[in-house]
Structures are given as C-alpha cells and as structure tokens.
Image (cartoon, rainbow, N blue to C red):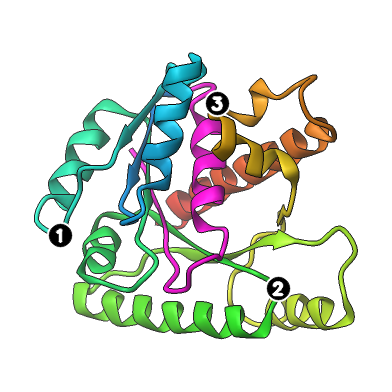
Amino acid sequence: MPVITFANSKGGSGKTTSALLLANALALGKPTAIIDADPRKPIASWKKKSDERGTFPANLTVVSDVNEDNLIDKIETLKQLNTFVIVDLEGLASKMMSYAVARSDYILVPCKEQQQDVEAALQVLGALKRDFQMLNRNVPFSLLFTMTKYVKSRSSRAIVDQLKATTIAVFQTEITERDPYSQIFMRGGTIYDLKGVVTNIDKAIEEVDAFTVELIDRLKQTRKAA
C-alpha cells in the first residue's frame, strides 16, 4: 500500500493542510491512515474536534503517538490495515524525515509562491537526495504549490513558471488559499461537511478532488516506470 510523505523544513508551508485534505479525500473511498508527526499535533487536535461533532471520517485513522523510535513500525503496521498511508512530518528536518523516506512511495514538498519558501523547499529536496544516496534508492517526489492566490502577482507567476520550466516535478494542481480549508481546523470535519455552511465550497471540493486524482495518477505512473 502506498506511503505518501509530506515534508518541508519551513513552517507555514501549507504542509499539514494539504496532507489532511488528501487524507480526507482518499478516505471517501478507501481505508486511509495519516500519521501526525508534527510536534504541534494539529491533526490530532482536528480529530478531537471532529469526534466531538461526530464528523470524523469513518474510513480514516489518525496516529499521533510517533517518535524516532517507533515511526517505521507505525508505518508498517498501518500499511497492513489501510490502502493509503500519509505521513505529515514535523516542520524541522530530523531523523524522522530519513526514516519516513525509507518507507515512502511518494514525497510531496509543499511550497508557497514566495522566494524564501522556494529556497527552503529546494533545501528539502537536497536533503531528500542525500537520503536517497544513503538508502541507495530513489523515491519519486514533487513540489506542490500551496496557499496560492486567486490573482497571482508578477513575482508569484515568475516563481511558478521558473520552477515548472526546470526538471523538478511540480504538481499542476495548486492548493489555493481558501476559507473552507481553515474552517475544518476550526470546527473539525472535512470540507465535504461544509456544503451549505461556507461559501465557495464547490470550488474547494473541485480543487481537492483534482489534487487527489493527480496524486493517484502520479502513483500509477511511478509503478509503471518501476
């Protein structure tokens, strides 16, 4: 079962939001687990709110009691019970990043359309490549632009165009800065529970569905290549 890791050494990159959106979308159809390895435990907090409201997805498992000693065992156990396993790594690079890479089938590096965020993401990619050398294996990875604006500034467009013109894989789908994505952390539940509650929810669902489809397509392509 594929293990999908979200990694970034810079806080505020939209990493946890993207990981949770993907987990919720996948859990609509298949048993899915998400490992909350962020010291702030944002997904564990989201789960508590969801449980209180009765909106926690039936097909989703959240595991937050992870550390450097048990991460690999947790991943292996969850792989036996779920179709997808998602790992939300802590913001700062650590041994857990290397351990997660060792068990990953795909890695996403969320990145905002800002120069300092791009530079941080490129540092993560450098660290990933060193891990690949150490492990003697390559894991497919892509940049994912997050918290993007509806109307892009000239600098944002230049950053996106520049990266998409390189050999670095970049998701075509972007996770836009949207109110529904903030709402689920405030109230629990998923964006699919927000119909009739917040505006522009259809656009948010369409975006997350497109992100999920693209991720699955990329997983299939990597399997064919292997």
Given this view, does label 3 or label 1 mark the residue nearer the observer? 3
Q: Is residue 106 above or below residue 197?
A: below
Local crowd at mark 1 within 10 Å, few (<14), some, or many (≥20)?
A: some
- Give the secondary structure at mark 1: loop
The residue located at (68%, 36%) in the rendering is 209
Q: Which residue type carries mark 3?
A: Gly
Q: Quadrant of the N terminus?
A: top left
- Give the secondary structure at mark 3: loop
Q: CA distance from mark 3 to mark 1?
A: 29 Å
Q: Which residue type carries mark 1?
A: Glu
The spot of residue 43 in percent (x, y) is 42, 41
Q: Which residue is mark 3?
A: 189
Residue 63 horizontal side relative to residue 105, left or right: left
The spot of residue 139 in percent (x, y) is 37, 64
Q: Which residue is mark 2?
A: 113
The residue located at (32%, 74%) in the rendering is 93
- Give the secondary structure at mark 2: loop
Instruction: For residue 87, say whether it is visible.
Output: yes
Instruction: For residue 3, say whether it is visible.
Output: no
Which region of the structure is painted magenta? 1-29
Q: CA distance from mark 2 to mark 3?
A: 28 Å
> Is 66 contained in the magenta span?
no
Q: Which residue is mark 1?
A: 68
> Is 28 contained in the magenta span?
yes
Closer to the N terminus: mark 3 or mark 1?
1
The residue located at (46%, 28%) in the rendering is 49
**Which residue is farthest left?**
69
Local crowd at mark 3 within 10 Å, few (<14), some, or many (≥20)?
A: many
Closer to the N terminus: mark 2 or mark 3?
2
